[in-house]
Image (tube, rainbow, N blue to C red):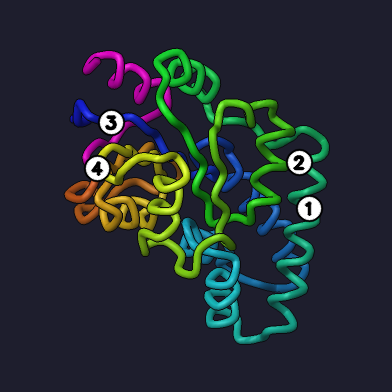
Amino acid sequence: MLPNNIDAFIFDMDGVIFDSESLYITCCVEAAEPLGMENIVETCYRCIGVTVGITRGILVETYGDEELVDRFRKDAAERFMDKFRRGLLEMKPGVRELLAFLKERHYKTAIASSTSTSYVETELGGAGIRPYFDHVVGGEQVSRSKPNPDIFLRAAELLGTTPERCAVIEDSFNGIRAAKAAGMTAVMVTDLLQPDDEIRALADEVLPSLLAVRDRIAEQT
């Protein structure tokens, strides 16, 4: 259940607003094959919801070769940007419907993503949905990444509200952990990861889509 005092919704971006994690994993598979990097999909799953720096650390730990990892990451990023420029990055179902619903009801909204602010702005602008968000907080704006609460607390500060009045929409385990650490309502919208027992216990809601989030808010208001 969502508390009645919620006045702001804070969204993760990758896997919540855009189907970017699936597209990026496709790019990683394409980049890894000529380099002989095995089990790249499993490794990518371990990187969901963490910063670029932590992702690089996981890759180096897994494959043991910094030069190889940097070549791989550069190739995967170039492939992703090429697909993005060609319009292949799709929004998740229900994005526009939920955002329009929230604006109609005068909720405050923000993006809080581990991705860099400039990249978030590029994706939101390209999709034509930047005006729906009052603020954007990228990963470089805080010193500690999810599962620490810093990015969500910063978003609440910018929105001019308090943590207990914020609901976070996340798809990653670290995102849910961060939301609860911030003292916020945590809503998991499932994407590539299905919640385990820990996340089901932490999350205030586990819903299958953004349309389901809209419907749940409408039921309770």
Q: Quadrant of the N terminus?
A: top left
Circle number at residue 164:
4
**Residue type, numbered disc 3:** Ile
In this rendering, the answer to whether 92 lies above or below 135 is: above
Residue ID for mark 2: 84
**Residue type, numbered disc 4:** Glu
Dot 4 lies on which element? helix
**Residue type, numbered disc 2:** Phe
Q: Earlier in the sequence, mark 3 or mark 4?
A: 3
x, y percent for residue 183: 24, 51
Q: Residue furthest front?
A: 160
Residue ID for mark 1: 79
x, y percent for residue 119: 69, 50
Q: Which residues are magenta?
A: 204-221
x, y percent for residue 20: 61, 44
Dot 3 lies on which element? loop
Say few, some or many: other residues with alpha carbon within 10 Å of mark 1 (under 14 / 14 to 19 / 20 or more).
some
Verify CB contact (< 8 Å) between mark 2 and mark 1: no
Verify CB contact (< 8 Å) between mark 2 and mark 4: no
Tag in front: 3 or 1: 3
Residue ID for mark 3: 6
Q: Quadrant of the C terminus?
A: top left
Verify CB contact (< 8 Å) between mark 3 and mark 4: no
Judge by depth and name the residue closer to the eye, 187 or 156.
156
Q: Per the image, is 217 magenta?
A: yes
Q: Earlier in the sequence, mark 2 or mark 3?
A: 3
Residue at the spot 69% in from the left edge and 40% down from the top edge? 123
Residue at the spot 52% in from the left edge and 42% down from the top edge? 111
In whole angstroms, how far apart are the C-alphas of marks 2 and 3? 34 Å
Dot 2 lies on which element? helix
Q: What is the count of numbered marks?
A: 4
Task: Name the side, left or right, on which 166 lies relative to 93.
Answer: left
